[in-house]
Amino acid sequence: MSYILSFETSTQVCSVALHQAGNLVASSEIHTSQSHSEKLTLLAQQILENAKINLEDVEAIAISKGPGSYTGLRIGVSTAKGLCFALQKPLISISTLKIMALEASNFIFDNQILICPMIDARRMEVYCAIFDVNLNEKLPINAAIITEKSFENILSNQKIFFMGDGAEKCKTTFSFSANAVFPRTEMKYPHAKNMGKLAFEKFNQKKFENVAYFEPFYLKEFVGKKLNES
């Protein structure tokens, strides 16, 4: 039956989805920050019950691997690994930014437009990458400080579709370029419901992670704050 259960916890949105052969069966999400640890397994249980699928019938667990929130990623990966260990099922990881780019590609009909998903990393920094509409990576995932010079060479002769909560801070900065395109509707966060196609491709290719040693793709080292820091 090839059911895959997917978790996306890299931002303030906590989402879970069930796909069969890449097609969405059910999904659920909650838009409350710092709720991942409490709600993730409950969302998964709810979805499986509504779909009348037993957890043992799931063929694999897919996880959005980052970049994104350190805490959110850690919770998602820990939950996914725990299920994989308990059920003896394979673990599939998918780039968070690629999940976002896939959603955008469904609304773009110009094959020349590039897609730049951005996750807010505070101040003027974002986690980002650039993909073409076929999800081929054109600029590797990186942590970038946004200035008027960012993407200048590409924007001089090619349109880029900027999306994600990190793109909000770029609208004014990139206003000089007509090639900087932003979504008219909200497209801020990655969602588990968009993971099915990518997860099923990896499942068919048997591109699984080592459950014991897999870690989220944090991109940057976690730096804790002192209690008196804002």
Image (spheres, rainbow, N blue to C red):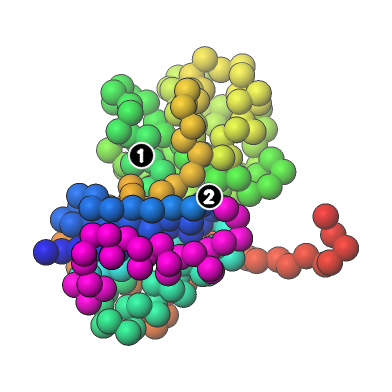
* Residue 58 position in % (x across, y down): 22, 70
How many dots with numbers?
2
Neighbour class for label 1 at 10 Å: few (<14), some, many (≥20)? some
* Residue 221 position in % (x across, y down): 63, 65
Position of the N terminus by quadrant: bottom left
Of 99 and 19, nearer the camera is 19
Vertical relation: 132 (above or below) 29 = above
Question: Which residue of the protein is positioned furthest toward the right in this rendering?
Answer: 228
Vertical relation: 214 (above or below) 24 = below
The residue that mark 1 highlights is 103
Residue visible at 21% across and 67% down?
53
Position of the C terminus by quadrant: bottom right
Q: Is residue 58 left or right of residue 39?
A: left
Q: Is residue 140 left or right of residue 167?
A: left
Secondary structure category for the residue under label 2: loop
- The main secondary structure of the magenta stretch is helix
Secondary structure category for the residue under label 1: helix
User: Any magenta on residue 124?
Assistant: no
Vertical relation: 164 (above or below) 204 = above
Of 113 and 193, nearer the camera is 193
The residue that mark 2 highlights is 31
Vertical relation: 132 (above or below) 216 = above
Is residue 29 something one can see in this rendering? yes
* Nearest-to-viewer mark from 1 and 2: 2
User: Any magenta on residue 55?
Assistant: yes
Of 108 and 192, nearer the camera is 192
Amino acid type assigned to the residue bearing label 2 in the image: His
Amino acid type assigned to the residue bearing label 1 in the image: Glu
Residue visible at 22% across and 77% down?
56
Which quadrant of the view contains residue 174? top right
Range of residues picked out in magenta: 31-57
